[in-house]
Amino acid sequence: MKLKQHIIALAAAAVVGGSASASFAATEIQWWHAMGGRLGEVVGEIADKYNASQSEYKLVATYKGGYEDTMTAGIAAFRAKNAPHIIQVFDAGAATIINAKGAVYPVADLLKEHGVGFNSNDYISGVRYFYADSDDKMIGLPFNSSTPLLYYNKAALDKAGVEAPKTWEDFEAIAPKLKEAGYEALAQSHSPWIFSENFHSRHNIQLASANNGYDSTDAKIMYNNEHMIMHWTKVKEWLDKGWYGYYGKAWGDNQDAFVQGKVAMWLGSSGSFGGLKKSAKFEFGTTYLPYWKSIIDEPKGTFIGGAALFSFVGHSDEEYKGVANFFEFLTSPESQFSWHKETGYVPITTAAYDLAKTEGYYKDTPDAEVGILQLSQPGGEWTKGYRLGYYVQIREAMYKAYENILTGNSSVPDAFADMEKESNALLERFHDTYN
Amino acid sequence: MKRVQFERSAVPYFFVAPQILIIVVFFLWPAAQAIYQSFLLEDAFGISSQFVWFRNYEDTILNFAWLQSAGFTIIFSVLVTFFSLAIALLLAVRANEVLHGSSSYKTMLMWAYAVAPPVAGLMGNLMFNPFVGDLYAALNILGWDFNQKLDAFDASFVVILISVWKQVSVNFIFFLSGLQSIPKGVMEAATLDCRSPEKRFWTITFPLLAPTTFFLMVINITYAFFETFGIIDTTTRGAPGGATNTLVYKVYTDGFLGADLGGSSAQSVILMIMVLVLTVFQFRFIERKVHY
């Protein structure tokens, strides 16, 4: 009887008291994550399922606030020699944790050394390298992975008599019609992520020296290039013509413009799917992130956003065994498929993707597959990802530059020159700090 | 003549010890840590660390974003202090004159005091929301092409308005009690000597309120410098183009979000020095004009 076991365990724990290291007690694995709201509930369910599946380890999932709060909590705990076993770190923070020499136990090593085994080819291509080092060794385990997609309001497009655009050239052709039909054609929720990082991936353009920053922290930003200047000159034109709406830095404010039916198309994350399904009172469709035909004929895949799970150093072998055991559970096709279904994040392994296909999930909800299809598009030289220090601040510098362009405060080349200068100063600081 | 001698005793030290301990633990020690940290380049996890003298200060001061932020902080603090003092004084003088139902007026004016800055920010954010915000709609109907997301002036207007609104009630309470402590006799004598209420206010009431005003000025500048953080964080987050990024918010984004400990420590030390200088200046030059 389960209940009886619990009572006995409780009583035993009470007797043993402080010395919880008693041999029969389950080894506790601490997991700090940044998934709030519905996502947090799903994480809780994962932990419950894992704990029910075995009795050797007890996984404790703790919500630590947003991505930045979670990382700061992890940093503070590590400095106090009290780090959790697993921490969720977002894309922009990856350089900070990976470059801190000896703060994390690379997940590829952790899995291999604790009897689980690891083969990076199990992971889908867009996900495989983002959190890897320059030798393609995976350091962090991709967890919630998403990619930018175009969502469109079907009724709005029908009213204007147009199709969702594949390229930005298409977009320029349909935007006037959407305007006539009473809509702003486009809004998007994360200009650094969608209109900069993935812009480079989609068009296979290098975004930073030193192999996009993977080879060395001694890197320089390369955003100040002709393609970006062209794109943002266009975006400013679109804004002035009433084809593009900017509702500020906050993700939700731009999404709201789409949900309220003010904007006909919106660039968001594949992970936004579930939320939109609930909030949008109209039928919407999903398609790939548009590209410029004038830059590239065959667009490349995008890279992922979201976050990965890292394991801190300094724990016992027994505990790492538990971490490896949990990671094995988490990457199993069943777990990945249910995570994919519940949240809209993409499954990270091909096995999980195959399972979703055989279960017929995409027959009922074809939109859910668009993200993973885009990630699986052919990769190029510059579609692996990027690894840049103080990237949170660099994104701030980018927001600043783009807002200065949109407000007309500075010309496009000036804004990019300022952004380049500020970003390179940050990268230099980072390089000097971490070497 | 024999001077009075007090016997030395450890007892008074014993009584002030808790207070001193609190100051040391919660103020001096962190401040010392910040100063120490500001001379280091250290990775976020504290694994490697090097002493770099004034590198962090140099990087801060030479950074255009920091200078822009410093400029905004000064304008912002001056405007917030001025308007929250002026409005509160006007309201206090008026409320002081009310005879019937005065306590309900006063209570209503004091209410906002209980609102925390982030809550004030969230409420403001809702009122200026482009889709459901009443103030946003009202301003646009009145012919102001208002859009705080794409206009630096409008964004500054939003953060200053909310910051002032939040602070007026605090100032109101102090001004009101200041007004009520002015002796009736003085006011009556003034009324006999001078018919113009305006002139009476500026020559009698206002100078008598000077200690209160001075105290509030110091408090309000500190408020504008530090406590408005919660309002910025819940409204503009420094946008657009860094136009509403105050220094303390920049310390937060660089240090807490961006994990640049040395840089943000240097920024906070500079901020500390700025406020220190400002306070010393106030006490030396403005306080002289205050008669207690």
Image: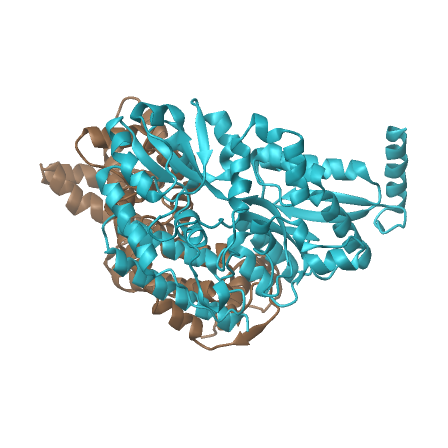
Across and down, in percent, residue A198 comes to: 44, 50
Q: Is residue A19 left or right of residue B262?
A: right
Q: Is residue B97 above or below residue A347?
A: above
Across and down, in percent, residue A246 comes to: 32, 41
Q: Is residue A171 visible?
A: yes
Task: Give A4 or B111, whichever is nearer the viewer.
Answer: A4
Residue B196 found in image quarter: top left
What colour scheme was applied to this rendering of the protein?
by chain
Residue A434 found in image quarter: bottom right
- The residue under the point 70% across, 43% down is A330
Q: Is residue B96 above or below residue A346?
A: above
- The residue under the point 40% across, 29% down is A259
Chain ID, brown in image: B
Task: Give B242 or B205, whichever is nearer the viewer.
Answer: B242
Task: Look at the image and tell me in which quarter the C terminus of chain A lies.
Answer: bottom right
Q: Is residue B202 left or right of residue A118?
A: left
Task: Look at the image and tell me in which quarter the N terminus of chain A lies.
Answer: top right
Q: Is residue B211 left or right of residue B30?
A: left
Across and down, in percent, residue B150 comes to: 28, 44
Q: Is residue A49 left or right of residue B40?
A: right
Which tint was used for chain A? cyan
Residue B48 found in image quarter: bottom right
Name the residue furthest front. Answer: A297
Q: Is residue B198 above or below residue A195?
A: above
Across and down, in percent, residue A343 comes to: 58, 35
Q: Is residue A253 visible?
A: no
